[in-house]
Image (cartoon, grey):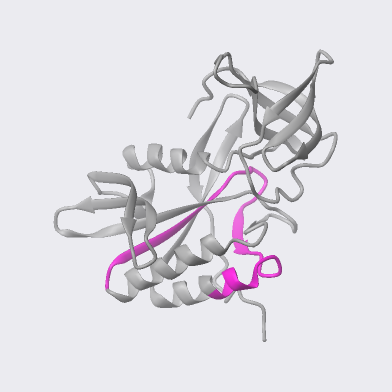
Amino acid sequence: MRFPSPLVPARLLRRYKRFLADCVLDDGREVTAHCPNPGAMLGLKDDGVRIWLLPNSDPKKKLKFGWRLVELEGGHFAGIDAGLPNLLVKEALAEDRIEALKGYSVIKPEQRYGDEKSRIDFLLSEPGRPDAYVEVKNCHLRRDGDWAEFPDCVTARGAKHLRELARIAEQGGRAVMLYVVQRTDCTRFRLAPDLDPAYALAFDAARAAGVEILCHGTDISPGGITLTNPLPVDPKPQALPG
């Protein structure tokens, strides 16, 4: 997926009120950019970090820049747009590029399901096959080695989605949790149970109920972001002992 216009580099001055970021462009201008991420963004919002902004000329938008990337050490990048993984997965599903989810001709986003009146990110259908319920989560936390971790803060909504998927699996349906790692310096995936113990418990219960756990990496540059290869998921129970 290509960005609609070239990104411009900047330095982060501060991120505040969850959705705002003050930045200084390379020409010295200070601007306020929209931050499309309500999460903690641990390790990605340090003052002075080099970032990349998407400019826009829409007169209806008050902010003329949107924060999209963080430049990491070693030529790596992290994407910070929490809504982008759904678009990446939609593109990859349409092109039949996700091996574990190939062969579905009908792809319906945002479908209601379950007892808690949730919306599944994608409902996949194909004659002669059970429907696949696919939930997508954005992941860009890295604290140790090449491990990507999720979540970066407490997510009661995420635990609810796991419970709904577990019910689907227990009823004999196909339920899939797909984590999209929006950073290029990670090669494997696990949870962060110290940051959200309840989510880790829900994850273990969902996996035991038959929910399929998938994880894919991304190729990221100032030109665009693409869903790439599957990443291995830690097979061990993820909840903290006791």
Q: Position of residue 236 (x, y in %)?
A: 57, 75
Q: Where's the C terminus, which quadrant?
A: bottom right
Residue at 56% in and 14% down: 59
Identify the residue at the far bottom of this view.
242
Depth check: give the residue in front, 184 or 168: 168
Query: Is 34 displayed left or right of 2 in the figure?
Result: right
Residue at 48% in and 30% down: 1
Check if residue 184 falls in the magenta segment. yes
Residue at 28% in and 74% down: 171
Q: Position of residue 98 (x, y in %)?
A: 39, 47
Number of numbered markers: 0
On the image, which quarter does residue 80 sit in? top right
Q: Position of residue 179 (x, y in %)?
A: 51, 54
What residue span does the magenta drawing correspond to?
Answer: 172-201
Check if residue 108 falls in the magenta segment. no
Residue at 78% in and 29% down: 22
Q: Is residue 147 above or below residue 166?
A: above
Q: Is residue 82 above or below residue 169?
A: above
Identify the residue at the far left of this view.
128
Q: Position of residue 40 (x, y in %)?
A: 70, 51
